[in-house]
Protein backbone atom coordinates (compact mmCIF):
# COMPACT_ATOMS: atom_id res chain seq x y z
CA UNK A 1 0.00 0.00 0.00
CA UNK A 2 1.42 3.35 -1.04
CA UNK A 3 1.99 5.61 1.96
CA UNK A 4 1.68 9.38 1.93
CA UNK A 5 3.95 11.93 3.56
CA UNK A 6 1.86 12.33 6.70
CA UNK A 7 3.63 15.54 7.66
CA UNK A 8 1.37 17.23 5.08
CA UNK A 9 -1.56 16.46 7.37
CA UNK A 10 -0.09 18.81 9.97
CA UNK A 11 -0.31 21.77 7.58
CA UNK A 12 -3.04 24.33 7.98
CA UNK A 13 -5.84 24.16 5.38
CA UNK A 14 -4.20 25.81 2.35
CA UNK A 15 -1.40 28.20 1.51
CA UNK A 16 -2.31 31.66 2.85
CA UNK A 17 -2.45 33.48 -0.47
CA UNK A 18 -4.43 30.67 -2.17
CA UNK A 19 -6.89 30.80 0.70
CA UNK A 20 -7.34 34.54 0.29
CA UNK A 21 -7.67 34.23 -3.50
CA UNK A 22 -10.46 31.67 -3.01
CA UNK A 23 -12.33 33.94 -0.60
CA UNK A 24 -11.99 36.89 -2.97
CA UNK A 25 -13.26 34.86 -5.96
CA UNK A 26 -16.23 33.60 -3.94
CA UNK A 27 -17.06 37.20 -2.98
CA UNK A 28 -16.68 38.37 -6.59
CA UNK A 29 -18.95 35.59 -7.83
CA UNK A 30 -21.60 36.54 -5.30
CA UNK A 31 -21.23 40.27 -6.14
CA UNK A 32 -20.36 40.42 -9.85
CA UNK A 33 -21.00 44.18 -10.00
CA UNK A 34 -18.56 45.14 -7.26
CA UNK A 35 -15.13 46.29 -8.40
CA UNK A 36 -12.51 44.80 -6.07
CA UNK A 37 -9.20 46.55 -5.44
CA UNK A 38 -6.41 44.13 -4.54
CA UNK A 39 -3.88 45.27 -1.97
CA UNK A 40 -3.31 41.73 -0.71
CA UNK A 41 -0.58 39.56 -2.26
CA UNK A 42 2.54 41.50 -3.18
CA UNK A 43 2.22 41.22 -6.93
CA UNK A 44 3.57 44.03 -9.11
CA UNK A 45 1.35 45.95 -11.53
CA UNK A 46 3.81 48.14 -13.48
CA UNK A 47 5.30 46.93 -16.79
CA UNK A 48 8.88 45.69 -16.95
CA UNK A 49 11.63 48.31 -17.39
CA UNK A 50 12.12 49.08 -21.10
CA UNK A 51 15.82 48.11 -20.83
CA UNK A 52 14.69 44.61 -19.76
CA UNK A 53 12.10 44.37 -22.52
CA UNK A 54 14.70 45.33 -25.16
CA UNK A 55 17.19 42.77 -23.84
CA UNK A 56 14.42 40.16 -23.64
CA UNK A 57 13.46 40.78 -27.31
CA UNK A 58 17.08 40.62 -28.48
CA UNK A 59 17.59 37.33 -26.64
CA UNK A 60 14.40 35.84 -28.13
CA UNK A 61 15.71 36.79 -31.60
CA UNK A 62 19.00 35.03 -30.79
CA UNK A 63 17.01 31.87 -30.06
CA UNK A 64 15.53 32.05 -33.57
CA UNK A 65 18.90 32.21 -35.32
CA UNK A 66 21.03 29.09 -35.87
CA UNK A 67 24.26 30.95 -35.12
CA UNK A 68 23.10 32.24 -31.71
CA UNK A 69 20.59 29.59 -30.66
CA UNK A 70 21.15 28.07 -27.17
CA UNK A 71 19.86 24.84 -25.68
CA UNK A 72 20.27 23.85 -22.03
CA UNK A 73 21.91 26.62 -20.07
CA UNK A 74 24.10 26.24 -16.99
CA UNK A 75 21.84 25.27 -14.05
CA UNK A 76 23.62 27.74 -11.78
CA UNK A 77 22.86 30.60 -14.17
CA UNK A 78 24.81 32.19 -17.03
CA UNK A 79 28.16 33.74 -16.10
CA UNK A 80 27.14 37.09 -17.61
CA UNK A 81 24.36 37.46 -15.04
CA UNK A 82 26.23 36.04 -12.03
CA UNK A 83 29.19 38.35 -12.70
CA UNK A 84 26.94 41.43 -12.79
CA UNK A 85 25.15 40.36 -9.61
CA UNK A 86 28.40 39.78 -7.71
CA UNK A 87 29.86 43.12 -8.78
CA UNK A 88 26.80 45.37 -8.58
CA UNK A 89 24.83 43.94 -5.67
CA UNK A 90 27.72 42.95 -3.41
CA UNK A 91 31.28 44.01 -4.29
CA UNK A 92 30.16 47.60 -4.93
CA UNK A 93 28.89 47.70 -1.33
CA UNK A 94 32.05 46.20 0.15
CA UNK A 95 30.62 42.67 0.38
CA UNK A 96 33.06 40.03 -0.79
CA UNK A 97 30.84 37.74 -2.89
CA UNK A 98 32.06 36.01 -6.07
CA UNK A 99 30.04 34.81 -9.10
CA UNK A 100 30.52 31.14 -8.20
CA UNK A 101 28.73 31.77 -4.90
CA UNK A 102 25.58 32.86 -6.77
CA UNK A 103 22.83 30.49 -7.91
CA UNK A 104 20.28 31.96 -10.32
CA UNK A 105 16.77 30.54 -9.89
CA UNK A 106 13.13 31.20 -10.72
CA UNK A 107 12.12 32.64 -7.36
CA UNK A 108 12.99 33.38 -3.75
CA UNK A 109 9.87 31.48 -2.72
CA UNK A 110 11.25 28.25 -4.24
CA UNK A 111 14.76 28.87 -2.89
CA UNK A 112 13.70 29.73 0.67
CA UNK A 113 11.39 26.71 0.52
CA UNK A 114 13.91 24.25 -0.96
CA UNK A 115 17.05 25.22 0.93
CA UNK A 116 16.02 23.27 4.03
CA UNK A 117 16.69 20.04 2.08
CA UNK A 118 20.44 20.41 2.53
CA UNK A 119 20.14 20.36 6.32
CA UNK A 120 19.48 17.39 8.58
CA UNK A 121 15.85 16.76 9.53
CA UNK A 122 16.68 16.80 13.24
CA UNK A 123 18.16 20.30 13.51
CA UNK A 124 16.56 23.00 15.66
CA UNK A 125 15.00 25.90 13.76
CA UNK A 126 14.09 29.44 14.75
CA UNK A 127 11.39 31.13 12.70
CA UNK A 128 10.03 34.63 13.25
CA UNK A 129 6.36 35.23 14.01
CA UNK A 130 4.79 36.94 12.06
CA UNK A 131 6.49 35.36 9.06
CA UNK A 132 6.27 34.71 5.32
CA UNK A 133 4.52 31.29 5.56
CA UNK A 134 6.86 29.44 3.17
CA UNK A 135 9.70 29.09 5.73
CA UNK A 136 7.43 27.36 8.19
CA UNK A 137 5.29 25.28 5.83
CA UNK A 138 8.30 23.76 4.03
CA UNK A 139 9.80 22.66 7.34
CA UNK A 140 6.47 21.13 8.33
CA UNK A 141 6.40 19.21 5.02
CA UNK A 142 9.94 17.97 5.69
CA UNK A 143 8.91 16.63 9.08
CA UNK A 144 10.90 19.02 11.26
CA UNK A 145 7.91 19.95 13.42
CA UNK A 146 5.39 18.31 15.67
CA UNK A 147 1.66 19.00 15.55
CA UNK A 148 -0.07 22.37 15.36
CA UNK A 149 -1.64 23.55 18.57
CA UNK A 150 -2.83 26.99 19.69
CA UNK A 151 -1.55 28.64 16.53
CA UNK A 152 1.93 27.08 16.65
CA UNK A 153 3.83 23.96 15.64
CA UNK A 154 5.58 21.97 18.32
CA UNK A 155 9.32 21.78 17.84
CA UNK A 156 9.86 25.25 16.35
CA UNK A 157 11.59 28.06 18.24
CA UNK A 158 9.37 31.05 17.48
CA UNK A 159 10.97 34.50 17.41
CA UNK A 160 8.22 36.88 18.40
CA UNK A 161 7.91 40.17 16.56
CA UNK A 162 5.84 42.57 18.63
CA UNK A 163 5.08 46.26 18.90
CA UNK A 164 7.42 46.31 21.94
CA UNK A 165 10.47 45.07 20.02
CA UNK A 166 9.57 47.01 16.85
CA UNK A 167 9.01 43.67 15.05
CA UNK A 168 12.72 42.87 15.30
CA UNK A 169 12.82 39.62 17.28
CA UNK A 170 15.24 39.10 20.17
CA UNK A 171 17.98 36.46 19.87
CA UNK A 172 16.88 32.94 20.87
CA UNK A 173 17.41 32.18 24.55
CA UNK A 174 19.30 28.95 23.82
CA UNK A 175 21.20 27.38 20.96
CA UNK A 176 19.43 27.05 17.60
CA UNK A 177 20.93 25.56 14.41
CA UNK A 178 19.03 27.31 11.61
CA UNK A 179 17.57 30.82 11.75
CA UNK A 180 15.28 32.50 9.22
CA UNK A 181 15.40 36.30 9.01
CA UNK A 182 13.80 38.67 6.48
CA UNK A 183 14.55 42.40 6.16
CA UNK A 184 12.95 44.68 5.04
CA UNK A 185 10.44 42.39 6.61
CA UNK A 186 7.56 40.64 4.96
CA UNK A 187 4.90 41.11 6.37
CA UNK A 188 5.65 43.99 8.78
CA UNK A 189 7.88 46.24 6.66
CA UNK A 190 10.29 46.58 9.62
CA UNK A 191 13.97 47.18 8.84
CA UNK A 192 17.10 46.15 10.73
CA UNK A 193 20.23 48.22 11.37
CA UNK A 194 23.79 46.97 10.83
CA UNK A 195 24.44 46.78 14.56
CA UNK A 196 21.26 44.80 15.18
CA UNK A 197 22.14 42.43 12.35
CA UNK A 198 25.68 42.10 13.71
CA UNK A 199 24.23 40.59 16.92
CA UNK A 200 22.56 37.85 14.86
CA UNK A 201 25.73 37.13 12.93
CA UNK A 202 27.75 36.99 16.18
CA UNK A 203 25.15 34.64 17.67
CA UNK A 204 25.37 32.35 14.61
CA UNK A 205 29.18 32.31 14.78
CA UNK A 206 29.18 31.46 18.50
CA UNK A 207 26.61 28.68 18.07
CA UNK A 208 27.76 27.22 14.72
CA UNK A 209 24.34 28.12 13.31
CA UNK A 210 23.36 29.23 9.83
CA UNK A 211 21.20 32.29 9.06
CA UNK A 212 18.90 32.19 6.04
CA UNK A 213 18.55 35.87 5.18
CA UNK A 214 15.68 36.80 2.88
CA UNK A 215 16.48 40.17 1.30
CA UNK A 216 13.82 40.05 -1.43
CA UNK A 217 12.73 43.61 -0.58
CA UNK A 218 16.18 45.26 -0.30
CA UNK A 219 15.50 47.52 -3.30
CA UNK A 220 12.97 49.44 -1.21
CA UNK A 221 15.61 50.56 1.33
CA UNK A 222 15.98 54.32 1.13
CA UNK A 223 18.26 55.00 4.09
CA UNK A 224 21.92 54.57 3.02
CA UNK A 225 22.87 53.47 6.54
CA UNK A 226 20.59 50.42 6.49
CA UNK A 227 22.21 47.19 5.22
CA UNK A 228 20.89 45.90 1.90
CA UNK A 229 22.78 42.65 2.33
CA UNK A 230 23.74 40.61 5.38
CA UNK A 231 27.27 40.44 3.90
CA UNK A 232 27.72 44.12 4.77
CA UNK A 233 28.04 42.84 8.35
CA UNK A 234 31.38 41.46 9.65
CA UNK A 235 31.68 37.68 9.68
CA UNK A 236 28.42 37.01 7.78
CA UNK A 237 30.22 35.18 4.96
CA UNK A 238 30.87 32.30 7.36
CA UNK A 239 27.32 31.87 8.63
CA UNK A 240 24.71 33.34 6.26
CA UNK A 241 22.97 32.50 3.00
CA UNK A 242 21.07 35.30 1.26
CA UNK A 243 18.01 35.22 -1.00
CA UNK A 244 17.26 37.92 -3.56
CA UNK A 245 14.71 38.35 -6.29
CA UNK A 246 14.06 40.48 -9.37
CA UNK A 247 10.31 40.08 -8.73
CA UNK A 248 9.74 43.14 -6.60
CA UNK A 249 12.90 45.08 -7.52
CA UNK A 250 12.27 45.07 -11.29
CA UNK A 251 8.76 43.72 -11.80
CA UNK A 252 9.69 40.10 -12.67
CA UNK A 253 6.84 38.28 -10.86
CA UNK A 254 5.46 37.12 -14.23
CA UNK A 255 8.75 36.19 -15.91
CA UNK A 256 10.60 34.74 -12.87
CA UNK A 257 14.20 35.37 -11.91
CA UNK A 258 15.89 35.36 -8.52
CA UNK A 259 19.11 34.18 -6.95
CA UNK A 260 20.58 32.71 -3.80
CA UNK A 261 24.04 33.43 -2.41
CA UNK A 262 25.85 30.52 -0.76
CA UNK A 263 29.34 31.67 0.30
CA UNK A 264 32.04 29.01 0.13
CA UNK A 265 32.93 29.71 3.75
CA UNK A 266 29.54 28.51 5.04
CA UNK A 267 29.75 24.97 6.36
CA UNK A 268 27.56 22.35 8.02
CA UNK A 269 28.64 19.23 9.89
CA UNK A 270 28.04 15.50 9.59
CA UNK A 271 26.98 13.52 12.67
CA UNK A 272 30.67 12.67 13.10
CA UNK A 273 31.61 16.35 13.10
CA UNK A 274 33.14 16.54 9.60
CA UNK A 275 32.65 19.88 7.87
CA UNK A 276 31.07 20.23 4.43
CA UNK A 277 30.70 23.45 2.42
CA UNK A 278 27.05 24.38 1.85
CA UNK A 279 28.01 25.77 -1.56
CA UNK A 280 28.86 22.23 -2.74
CA UNK A 281 25.65 20.81 -1.31
CA UNK A 282 23.43 23.47 -2.84
CA UNK A 283 25.29 23.16 -6.15
CA UNK A 284 24.57 19.41 -6.12
CA UNK A 285 20.91 20.00 -5.29
CA UNK A 286 20.48 22.82 -7.81
CA UNK A 287 22.12 20.96 -10.72
CA UNK A 288 20.12 17.82 -9.96
CA UNK A 289 16.68 19.29 -9.43
CA UNK A 290 16.62 22.64 -11.25
CA UNK A 291 16.70 23.23 -15.01
CA UNK A 292 17.91 26.81 -14.95
CA UNK A 293 16.14 30.06 -15.82
CA UNK A 294 15.51 30.56 -19.53
CA UNK A 295 18.12 32.52 -21.47
CA UNK A 296 15.97 35.53 -22.50
CA UNK A 297 14.86 36.02 -18.89
CA UNK A 298 18.47 36.02 -17.70
CA UNK A 299 19.34 38.59 -20.37
CA UNK A 300 16.37 40.69 -19.17
CA UNK A 301 17.66 40.41 -15.58
CA UNK A 302 21.16 41.39 -16.68
CA UNK A 303 19.69 44.57 -18.21
CA UNK A 304 18.56 45.69 -14.73
CA UNK A 305 22.27 46.47 -14.10
CA UNK A 306 22.68 48.78 -17.13
CA UNK A 307 22.51 52.54 -16.43
CA UNK A 308 19.14 52.70 -18.14
CA UNK A 309 17.89 49.61 -16.31
CA UNK A 310 18.96 50.95 -12.93
CA UNK A 311 17.13 54.23 -13.50
CA UNK A 312 13.98 52.47 -14.74
CA UNK A 313 13.96 49.96 -11.86
CA UNK A 314 14.41 52.81 -9.39
CA UNK A 315 11.41 54.56 -10.94
CA UNK A 316 9.32 51.44 -10.25
CA UNK A 317 10.40 51.37 -6.61
CA UNK A 318 9.69 55.11 -6.26
CA UNK A 319 6.23 54.57 -7.72
CA UNK A 320 5.32 51.85 -5.22
CA UNK A 321 6.85 53.80 -2.33
CA UNK A 322 4.63 56.75 -3.26
CA UNK A 323 1.64 54.39 -2.98
CA UNK A 324 2.98 53.13 0.35
CA UNK A 325 3.33 56.67 1.70
CA UNK A 326 -0.26 57.44 0.73
CA UNK A 327 -1.55 54.26 2.40
CA UNK A 328 0.37 54.90 5.59
CA UNK A 329 -0.74 58.52 5.74
CA UNK A 330 -4.42 57.71 5.12
CA UNK A 331 -4.61 54.75 7.48
CA UNK A 332 -2.75 56.63 10.22
CA UNK A 333 -5.15 59.56 9.79
CA UNK A 334 -7.98 57.17 10.61
CA UNK A 335 -6.33 56.56 13.99
CA UNK A 336 -4.59 53.24 13.33
CA UNK A 337 -0.95 52.68 14.29
CA UNK A 338 1.11 51.58 11.29
CA UNK A 339 4.67 50.54 10.60
CA UNK A 340 6.43 49.84 7.30
CA UNK A 341 5.88 51.55 3.99
CA UNK A 342 9.02 53.71 4.25
CA UNK A 343 11.61 51.10 3.18
CA UNK A 344 9.10 48.48 2.16
CA UNK A 345 6.01 48.01 -0.02
CA UNK A 346 4.06 46.69 2.98
CA UNK A 347 2.19 48.63 5.66
CA UNK A 348 1.45 46.73 8.84
CA UNK A 349 -1.64 48.07 10.54
CA UNK A 350 -2.63 47.52 14.17
CA UNK A 351 -6.39 46.97 13.91
CA UNK A 352 -6.75 45.90 17.56
CA UNK A 353 -9.35 43.42 16.42
CA UNK A 354 -9.63 39.94 14.88
CA UNK A 355 -7.62 40.19 11.69
CA UNK A 356 -9.80 37.88 9.55
CA UNK A 357 -12.90 39.84 10.70
CA UNK A 358 -11.15 43.07 9.64
CA UNK A 359 -10.21 41.46 6.31
CA UNK A 360 -13.87 40.49 5.75
CA UNK A 361 -15.05 43.97 6.69
CA UNK A 362 -12.70 45.65 4.18
CA UNK A 363 -13.66 43.17 1.46
CA UNK A 364 -17.41 43.29 2.01
CA UNK A 365 -17.84 46.98 2.79
CA UNK A 366 -15.03 48.63 0.83
CA UNK A 367 -14.29 45.99 -1.81
CA UNK A 368 -10.61 46.16 -0.84
CA UNK A 369 -8.40 43.10 -0.34
CA UNK A 370 -5.69 43.15 2.32
CA UNK A 371 -3.88 40.26 4.06
CA UNK A 372 -4.98 39.31 7.57
CA UNK A 373 -2.04 39.38 9.98
CA UNK A 374 -3.10 36.09 11.60
CA UNK A 375 -2.18 34.35 8.34
CA UNK A 376 1.47 35.16 9.11
CA UNK A 377 1.40 33.65 12.60
CA UNK A 378 0.03 34.10 16.09
CA UNK A 379 1.84 37.42 16.64
CA UNK A 380 0.11 38.75 13.52
CA UNK A 381 -3.33 38.46 15.10
CA UNK A 382 -4.85 41.93 15.50
CA UNK A 383 -2.98 43.29 12.45
CA UNK A 384 -3.50 43.45 8.69
CA UNK A 385 -0.93 43.92 5.93
CA UNK A 386 -1.69 46.35 3.12
CA UNK A 387 0.40 46.03 -0.03
CA UNK A 388 1.42 49.08 -2.06
CA UNK A 389 1.59 47.09 -5.30
CA UNK A 390 -1.16 48.55 -7.45
CA UNK A 391 -1.81 51.59 -9.64
CA UNK A 392 -1.67 54.89 -7.76
CA UNK A 393 -5.23 55.77 -8.81
CA UNK A 394 -6.47 52.43 -7.49
CA UNK A 395 -4.70 53.00 -4.19
CA UNK A 396 -6.31 56.45 -3.95
CA UNK A 397 -9.69 54.92 -4.68
CA UNK A 398 -9.13 52.15 -2.11
CA UNK A 399 -8.19 54.70 0.52
CA UNK A 400 -11.32 56.76 -0.24
CA UNK A 401 -13.50 53.68 0.16
CA UNK A 402 -11.76 52.64 3.40
CA UNK A 403 -12.22 56.17 4.80
CA UNK A 404 -15.93 55.91 4.09
CA UNK A 405 -16.43 52.57 5.81
CA UNK A 406 -14.16 52.90 8.84
C1 LIG B 1 3.61 38.30 -0.51
O1 LIG B 1 2.57 38.89 -0.80
O2 LIG B 1 3.96 38.06 0.66
C2 LIG B 1 4.49 37.88 -1.64
O3 LIG B 1 3.98 38.28 -2.86
C3 LIG B 1 4.62 36.44 -1.66
C4 LIG B 1 5.68 36.00 -2.60
O4 LIG B 1 6.48 36.79 -3.10
O5 LIG B 1 5.72 34.79 -2.81
Image (spheres, grey):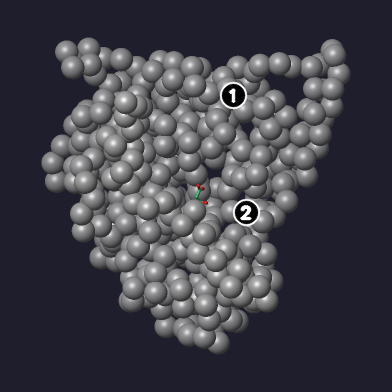
Residue 115 placement: quadrant: top left
Image location (x, y in percent) of residue 58: 82, 30
Q: Is residue 155 left or right of residue 251?
A: left
Q: Is residue 5 left or right of residue 225?
A: left
**Ligand 1 under 8 Å from disc 2 Cβ:** no
Quickly name the residue at label 2: 44
Farthest residue in the left direction?
174
Viewer can see residue 298: yes
Farthest residue in the bottom direction?
404
User: Dividing the image into 4 quarters, which one contains the N terminus?
Assistant: top left
Relative vertical location of residue 10 with respect to residue 382 in this rendering, above or below: above
Identified at 60% across, 35% down, the residue is 257
Q: Earlier in the sequence, mark 2 or mark 1?
A: 2
Residues at discs 2 and 1 in contact (Cβ within 8 Å):
no
Helix, strand or loop status at disc 1: loop
Is 38 in front, or is 192? 38
Image location (x, y in percent) of residue 404: 55, 87
Relative vertical location of residue 245 with respect to residue 368 in this rendering, above or below: above
Other-residue count near label 1 (Cα within 10 Å), few / some / many at <14 / 14–19 / ≥20: many
Farthest residue in the front direction?
1
Identified at 74% across, 17% down, the residue is 70
Identified at 24% across, 19% down, the residue is 269
Q: Which mark is residue 292?
A: 1
Is 356 in front, or is 100? 356
Q: Residues under labels 2 and 1: Cα distance?
A: 23 Å
Viewer can see residue 338: no
Q: Which mark is residue 133?
A: none
Identified at 28% across, 45% down, the residue is 10
Image location (x, y in percent) of residue 64: 84, 22
Amino acid sequence: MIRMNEHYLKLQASYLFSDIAKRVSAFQEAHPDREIIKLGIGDVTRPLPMACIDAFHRAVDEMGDISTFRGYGPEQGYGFLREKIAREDFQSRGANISPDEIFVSDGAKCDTGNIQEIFSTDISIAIPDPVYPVYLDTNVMAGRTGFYENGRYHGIVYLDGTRENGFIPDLPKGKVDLIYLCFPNNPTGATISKSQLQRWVDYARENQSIILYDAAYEAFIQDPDLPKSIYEVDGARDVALEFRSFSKSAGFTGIRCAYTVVPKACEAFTGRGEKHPLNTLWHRRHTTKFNGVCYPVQRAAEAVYSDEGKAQAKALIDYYLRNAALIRQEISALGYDCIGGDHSPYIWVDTKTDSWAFFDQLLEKAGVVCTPGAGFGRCGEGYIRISAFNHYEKVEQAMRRIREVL
